[in-house]
Amino acid sequence: MKEYVCVWKDEFDSSNKIDLDKWEFSVGGHGWGNGELQYYTDNRDENIMICNNKLVIRSNYESWQGNQFTSAKIISKESWKYGKIRVRAKIPLAVGTWPAIWMLPISYDGTNWPYCGEVDIVEHFGHTRGEIFFSLHSGEYNFYKNKFNHYQITTSHMRKTLLQLSMIAFILSGIQNTLTAQEKTPLNQVVNTLKERISLAGYAQLGYTYDDAANPDNTFDIKRIIFMAHGKITDRWTCDFMYDFYNGGMLLEVYTDYRIFSGLTARIGEFKVPYTIENELSPTTVELINCYSQSVCYLAGVSGSDKCYGMTSGRDIGMMIHGKLFHDFLQYKFAVMNGQGLNTKDKNSQKDVVGNLMVYPNKWLSVGGSFIRGTGHAIADSQYSGIKTGENYAKKRMSLGGVVTTSAFNFRTEYLAGKDKNVKSEGFYATGSVRLVQNFDFIASFDYFNPNKAADFKQNNYIAGLQYWFYPRCRVQAQYTFCDKKGDGQKDSNMVQAQVQVRF
């Protein structure tokens, strides 16, 4: 019998980071020919890490580079013509997941798949609970011909194998029959269906603020306590729900998406307005404790600093079509919305038209812009524009910006402009983070906003801080902000903030 000699291995026990001499990351979110919804990130701890001598790959429900989910994909730098491959892995069983370990040729030489060959060591489809597949793909055996060369192992197969190897077959057989009978009961069927089709998540952010502009403001506070649910009705139809339990409770999002075909999805409900890059980002991923820039808070209605628009949390009720085209090179969003914000009917029967276009020239860069056109209905008097409560006014918004995303450096910048009635406003921000050491980032930001260019009521915020990710998606933050204020009798101020974020 031929004896095998180990020529390459990774037990993931040498350090807490991926060995980049052995592996490389496949980065992107173009679907990979399979219609996949996630963005594969570049060595991001939230998606891939080594924990207790195990490689952990995690998919997260979060907005990233225009995708709704994130995950990770790594490829070995070594290759072999002949040999024996041994892999040990634990896979998820949730609907929507597609864990896989497989082999492809290192060079295609112009040969298209599947004629180049593919060996699937193991893969699992979330909708086929209790079944795993081993497959060979070639010119003869492929789904183009509706012809497959694969071996399927089901739960029953695995049970039979265990029974054959066990000395206590009778006992195990009794247990198996009991479990099988239980699985057939209506209650268990309902529970299993819910587990497979519904995913739950949430997060909380708690912090401390010292602001000498508020006589001073020296307080601990709860910023958010968020609960989220994502339901998969069919392969094309999903629904989402988000609720904030803090400060009396508030429904933030409830909407449904239906994928009409590849590149076109329709959405209806209450959701983030697709205006600006920053507004659609989750507070769990934004680097700053106050989250969004002054101009985004004002022009997207996030904070209520625009008294006419009020506090909308950047959300509204309406419908939208969105999708990605040309192998995910271009992402578009086009929406028609009430223009009144959270849980509020339209007060003037005029709708806001919102558009957003982003292009992705490569895996680390995205650039684009957005706009809003509509007629606002003032819910309070504006201190900058002179618009009075109950008045209808022309509302215009635009933005242009870009994002750079790498494993060690992230940078986001955007210019925003608005016009309410005859009053023009503008803003600009540039925010970046640099990985100093493992899980430890330095944060810096410049944030300019002028709500009335004619009166020159401008403010520049200079921000510096640190954050430490002590667990995937969980972090502690500390930041200092110098507020340089001009006009309207404003005085410069200083702010010190700290925050803890826990997400599950």
Image: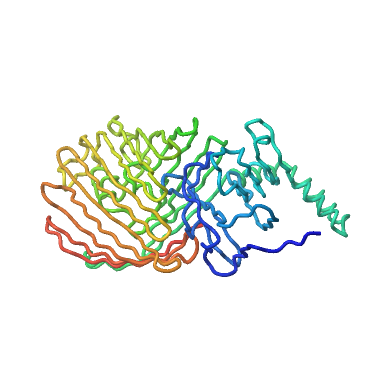
| Image-quadrant location for residue 374 | top left
> Which residue does the image show at 47% across and 50% down from the upper left?
27
Q: Nearer the viewer, residue 210 or 320?
A: 320
| Image-quadrant location for residue 310 | top left
Measured as percent of width and height from the top left, residue 170 is found at 88, 55
| Image-quadrant location for residue 189 | top right
Q: Is residue 263 left or right of residue 350?
A: right
Depicted 247 relative to depicted 499: above or below: above
Measured as percent of width and height from the top left, residue 377 is found at 25, 37
Q: Nearer the viewer, residue 329 or 23?
A: 23
Q: How many marks?
A: 0
> Which residue does the image show at 63% across and 62% down from the upper left?
8
Measured as percent of width and height from the top left, residue 281 is found at 38, 50
Measured as percent of width and height from the top left, residue 59 is found at 53, 52
Q: Is residue 430 left or right of residue 360?
A: left
Depicted 227 relative to depicted 495: above or below: above
Q: Nearer the viewer, residue 12 or 417?
A: 12
> Which residue does the image show at 45% across and 48% down from the upper left?
243
Colour option used: rainbow
Q: Is residue 71 left or right of residue 425?
A: right
Q: Residue furthest front?
A: 109
